[in-house]
Image (cartoon, rainbow, N blue to C red):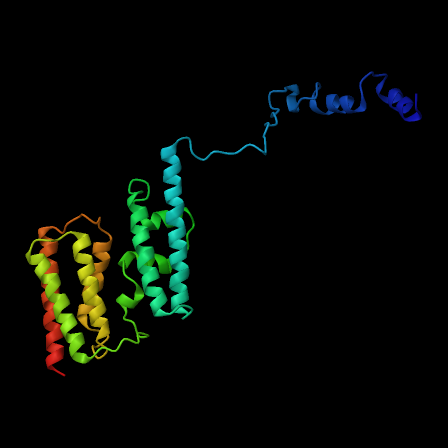
């Protein structure tokens, strides 16, 4: 027996236990248990297989839903990058406009498959920590920035009278559609977008022209509706009033030139 073991025996008395067991018994109440001598507080180490695949879904329906949410997420991120690139002149208006229209259409298609799961864009972005303010704004209005604010970089030559003719025609198209009782969101939104785009094409028109603000408000409202959802009688009447007042304001400006 070693000198150290002889010394321990002289202090604690002879023991057949190992040093580890003696330490556990004297310090934690015996039997290697925790405080109080009970072993009920011990936690079993979980048996984890790091090579095992963790399944996020249990059936095909859940898998399709997860894929659609991933698509929606990626569309928002790509649209954010596109908006920032356009703002920084990293892409031209000819590249930006069709790409933006495509992404907005893809967003609408993807979100239509997730109506019950993703009823609100802001909640979806908050839940998944998506910081994409430019994309959220573009989705909200539903048209590219070149339509909302005009396309200053356009090289398409368009005369004053041609612009006037386009504006008049677009106003008449929208008002005729309402007179025919066609008030579905997917029917009215493109017509108002045409009005907005033609107004922006008139360079001499004042930047604070009231028609732009009204069209923008209606574009946002209609874009937040389902495609087949129709305006009620009160909304239809208000839109007719806004179109007529905006049309009159345009003619008043035109006659003042």
Residue 132 visible in image: no
Q: Residue at x 58, y 33 (%)?
A: 51
Give the residue furthest to the bottom: 257
* Image coordinates for residue 106, horizontal then vertical, percent: 32, 52
Looking at the picture, does residue 209 appear above or below residue 117?
below
Looking at the rendered image, the quarter that the C terminus falls into is bottom left
Toward which corner of the image does residue 197 lie, by quadrant? bottom left
Looking at the rendered image, the quarter that the N terminus falls into is top right
* Image coordinates for residue 76, horizontal then vertical, percent: 38, 54
Q: How many marks?
A: 0
- The residue closer to the viewer here, 226 or 209, is 226
- The residue closer to the viewer here, 145 or 33, is 145
Looking at the picture, does residue 176 appear above or below residue 23?
below
Q: Residue at x 13, y 79 (%)?
A: 254
Is 78 on the left-hand or right-hand side of 52? left
Residue 41 visible in image: yes
Give the residue furthest to the front: 156
- The residue closer to the viewer here, 149 or 176, is 176
Q: Residue at x 31, y 56 (%)?
A: 104
* Image coordinates for residue 196, horizontal then vertical, percent: 21, 67
Give the residue furthest to the left: 179
Q: Residue at x 75, y 22 (%)?
A: 26
Toward which corner of the image does residue 219 lie, by quadrant? bottom left
* Image coordinates for residue 85, horizontal then vertical, percent: 41, 65
Is 1 on the left-hand or right-hand side of 211? right
Is 11 on the left-hand or right-hand side of 187? right
Is 243 on the left-hand or right-hand side of 66? left
């Amino acid at each position: 027996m070693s000198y150290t073991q002889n010394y321990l025996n002289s202090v604690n008395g002879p023991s057949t236990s190992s040093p580890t067991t003696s330490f556990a018994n004297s310090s934690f109440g015996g039997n290697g248990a925790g405080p109080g001598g009970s072993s009920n507080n011990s936690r079993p180490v979980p048996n984890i297989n790091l090579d095992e695949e963790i399944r996020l879904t249990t059936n095909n329906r859940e898998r399709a839903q997860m894929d659609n949410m991933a698509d929606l997420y990626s569309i928002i991120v790509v649209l954010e990058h596109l908006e920032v690139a356009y703002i920084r002149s990293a892409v031209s208006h000819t590249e930006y406009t069709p790409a933006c229209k495509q992404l907005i259409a893809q967003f609408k298609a993807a979100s239509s498959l997730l109506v019950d799961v993703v009823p609100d864009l802001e909640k979806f972005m908050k839940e998944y920590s998506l910081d994409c303010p430019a994309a959220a704004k573009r989705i909200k209005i539903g048209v590219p920035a070149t339509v909302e604010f005009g396309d200053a970089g356009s090289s398409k030559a368009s005369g004053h009278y041609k612009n006037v003719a386009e504006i008049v025609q677009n106003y008449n198209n929208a008002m005729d559609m309402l007179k025919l009782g066609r008030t579905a969101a997917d029917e009215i939104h493109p017509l108002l977008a045409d009005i907005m785009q033609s107004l922006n094409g008139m360079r001499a028109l004042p930047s604070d022209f009231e028609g732009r603000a009204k069209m923008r408000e209606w574009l946002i409202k209609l874009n937040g509706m389902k495609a087949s959802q129709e305006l009620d009688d009160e909304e239809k009447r208000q839109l007719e009033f806004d179109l007529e007042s905006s049309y009159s304001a345009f003619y008043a400006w035109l006659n003042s030139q």
